[in-house]
Image (cartoon, rainbow, N blue to C red):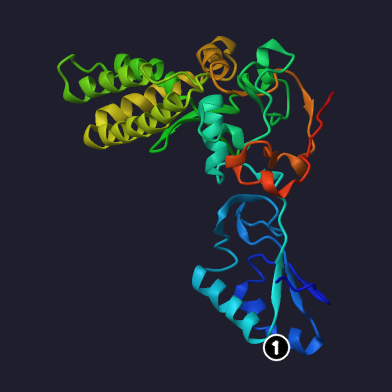
Amino acid sequence: MSQIPSATYRIQFNKDFTFANAGALADYLRELGISHLYASPYFKATPGSSHGYDVTDHNELNPEVGSKEEYDAFIAALKRNGLRQIVDFVPNHMGIGSFNPYWMDVLENGRGSKYAAFFDIDWHPLKEELEEKVLLPILGDQYGRVLERGELKLSFEAAGFSLTYFETRLPINPRSYPTLLKKALDLGGLPPEHEGGVELQSIATACEHLPRRTETEPEKVAERSREKEVIKKRLERACQEHPAIAEAIQAAVGLYNGQPGDPHSFDALDVLIREQAIAPPFGAWRRRRSITGASSTSIRWPQSGWRRRRYSKSRTVWSSS
């Protein structure tokens, strides 16, 4: 039977106050007459978070707060002193960015992501240009100006192709890879029989056969989720085994990134961006920087794990300038 708290003591966990620090206070809290330690969120959060509410994975402990062994020691200290704990967290939003694998998967695969239902996203808004897209109000200026200044950059690494805007990384839909890979083949000047070139052509074909990001049948979602990772591993291996392939891909990336002062040199990148599930606002937006790092999560989908907690959804309102 649950014990009703008679006195609580709030603990704010972060990299400067860990499980070990809290465990060392257990004796003191018992002497104060505390019945429950009221803990701030200590699940995996955005690195450097001072509060922990920007959770990126509810199934993992925050490594900055401590390891599983340190957590167990903390719990043991509470038990020795007859203390219980209340853990605070907000299930109606998550921290977003490259440290949240669920969010990144949605940006890459749109409604075809196996995590799409985790988030409170309107895939069919009133504006037709935002159909099947996630609007990301991250730009500090008009889209065209940002693009032609070269602030939106295509990049390639082991995780695949991505678009970067300063510290923000946005994954590219693998179905867009063929255009990039074929450009790399043209620039690389590899003979048709070149082993690496043949592999690159095969990878491009595999990308073209992926289910589209708008396909939501469970079997199609599962196929896309599985095969896109196989494709990335093949592409990484091809670059490792054939340096000429890696050089050709980087040359193609450089071509897509254009040249400031030459607006038409960014045309190909513009087309690529508009193919994605992400949609930077194609106008100027007034941003509230303090809340651009969080996204609402859905409480209507049972598998999301939050429906039973019956919290109301948070909503973020963006004002057009």
Q: Nearer the viewer, residue 264 or 294?
A: 294
Q: Is residue 27 left or right of residue 207?
A: right
Say which residue appears at 68% left-offset and 50% top-offset. Answer: 54
Q: Check the image and report above or below for 298 versus 195.
A: below
For disc 1, the marked residue is 27
Question: Can the viewer see residue 261 in this picture?
Answer: yes
The N terminus lies in quadrant: bottom right
Q: Check the image and report above or below for 45 versus 78.
A: above
Say which residue appears at 60% left-offset and 54% top-offset. Answer: 47
Residue farthest toward the left in the current orientation of the protein? 193
Question: Can the viewer see residue 163 in this picture?
Answer: no
The C terminus lies in quadrant: top right
Say which residue appears at 36% left-offset and 21% top-offset. Answer: 207
- Picture quadrant of residue 298: top right
Say which residue appears at 69% left-offset and 40% top-offset. Answer: 299
Q: Is residue 293 left or right of residue 76?
A: right
* Helix, strand or loop status at disc 1: helix
Q: Amino acid at mark 1?
A: Asp
Q: Check the image and report above or below for 48 versus 23.
A: above
Q: Nearer the viewer, residue 189 or 169?
A: 169
